[in-house]
Image: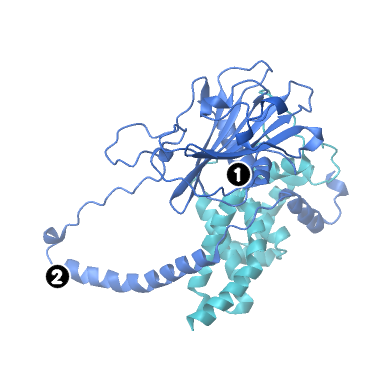
Amino acid sequence: MAGTTDSGFAVYFADRVAGLRRAAYLLTGNWHDAEDVVQAAFVRLYGVWHRVRRDTADAYLRKVMINVFLSSKRGQPAREHPVPDLPDLPAAQPVADDRLVLRHALAALTPHQRAVVVLRYWDGLSVAETAAALGISQGTVKSQLHRAVHALRPYLSEDRGVR
Amino acid sequence: MPDDIGNLDLTMRRALTRCLPEHEPAIGVDLEEVLRRGRRRFHTRRIVPVAAAVITVLAIAVPWSLHRPAPPEPPPVLGTGPATATSTEPTGPRIPAGHRRDTDADTLTTYAVQNRLPAGRIVEHFGTRSDEFDGGGRYGYGFHMLWAEGGRYGYLIGLHRTRGAYPATAYGLPAEPCAEPGTRLPQYNCAPFEAPAGDLATSFELAEQGYRMRGLIWEKQDPAGGAPIRVTGIFYLPAPGAPTPFPALDTAPRLESFPLTVADIARAFGMEI
């Protein structure tokens, strides 16, 4: 019985882990924290695997991942700020890669704004689904999205010519 | 800019895609570990209510003074000091003279170096910076990582400074293992390593007198026209007792094989290959 459960879970894990890790990277900004969040989400899913319907497993997993991420950020002041590249000179250098600039801008959003952006635009959820996943109102989702998009907008164009 | 963003959903999706690094490290989330932790969590959740009820009954039935629990043991500290529990020595990293711990280098170690590595087991890391500018008008930076797997340890180090400044010997590493064809030490197994922009890079690997190293020296041209840069990346398995910045390495057993290839090390320290 456990073997069947495990093999079913293993197939699901193999199918979802890479995609979930990318979403977690967008939330956390680095692969190590992303993998911690993903692992915690799968551990919790496995604990209830026998009673989760397969058609709702994705939503459950996503919700757990977001909760783990937000819990890890709660009450934790931002201590680390991503920096663009290995330093060649001690003086401040102009950032040379628009991908890194964009990554900085994303990292500068609040954890809740990042969660809303990732759910809405990366996972492709509707505003209502995003609100349900986060346990907040649709109005809050919209206002968070508005602020996040406003903050990211200067960096959204792919031909900003900063390379 | 803002007005020419037509389809916001698509634009945002593309923007998020661009936020992902071009090189994705191998997935380090292990299914077996998930299953093991999941089972433990599942069983703990079933047991806890029963245990809580038993404890409640006992607390009511038995005078508390007879069952006062002993104070809990302090949790063990991993990899921050010698194994002796009574040691009062400082447990932070040991930094060579002329260098200091540096928050920029710390951050770079976290984001720029670790993110380029295959998912691994870095249990401690820190960054250093030289106190003074070197002859090339830049600081010498160091990125230091303690790697642990299965109770065994190794030390991954990256140095970034003007060529010739702040030699790697400050960290117990060879300064010039492969500098010139005529001075290469045969036992270092130096070999050319393909580097971008026509830079000269040499990989080396040695195993002697109880210690082992695998790494590369990259003579990097400064794109801004400054003095040539030397990037050194080495995975180091020191001999027992050899000094390293990490006190945990003083007594811990070494890894039995290198967990990273030369290409992994090169990529970790900024070489686009």
Q: Is residue A155 left or right of residue B130?
A: right
Residue under circle 1? B114
Q: Nearer the viewer, mark 1 or mark 2?
A: 1
| Residue A156 position within the rendered picture, expressed as x and y whole percent measured from the top left | 79, 47
Q: Is residue B55 above or below residue B196?
A: below
| Residue A44 position within the rendered picture, expressed as x and y whole percent measured from the top left | 50, 67
Badge 1 or badge 2: first in the primary sequence: 2
Q: Is residue A24 left or right of residue A97?
A: left
Tally of numbered discs = 2
Q: Is residue A80 visible?
A: no
Q: Is residue B151 left or right of residue B27?
A: left
As rendered, which of B2 and B196 lies closer to the eye? B196
Q: Is residue B246 above or below residue A153?
A: above
Q: Is residue A29 above or below residue B44?
A: above
Chain letter, disc 1 residue: B
Same chain for labels 1 and 2? Say yes or no. Answer: yes
- Tell me the SS state at disc 1: helix
Residue under circle 2? B61
Give, as a three-letter code, the residue at label 2.
Ala
Give, as a three-letter code, the residue at label 1.
Gln
Spatial CA span between label 1 and label 2: 55 Å
Chain B: colour as depicted:
blue
Rendered image quadrant of residue B168: top right
Locate the C terminus of chain B by quadrant.
top right
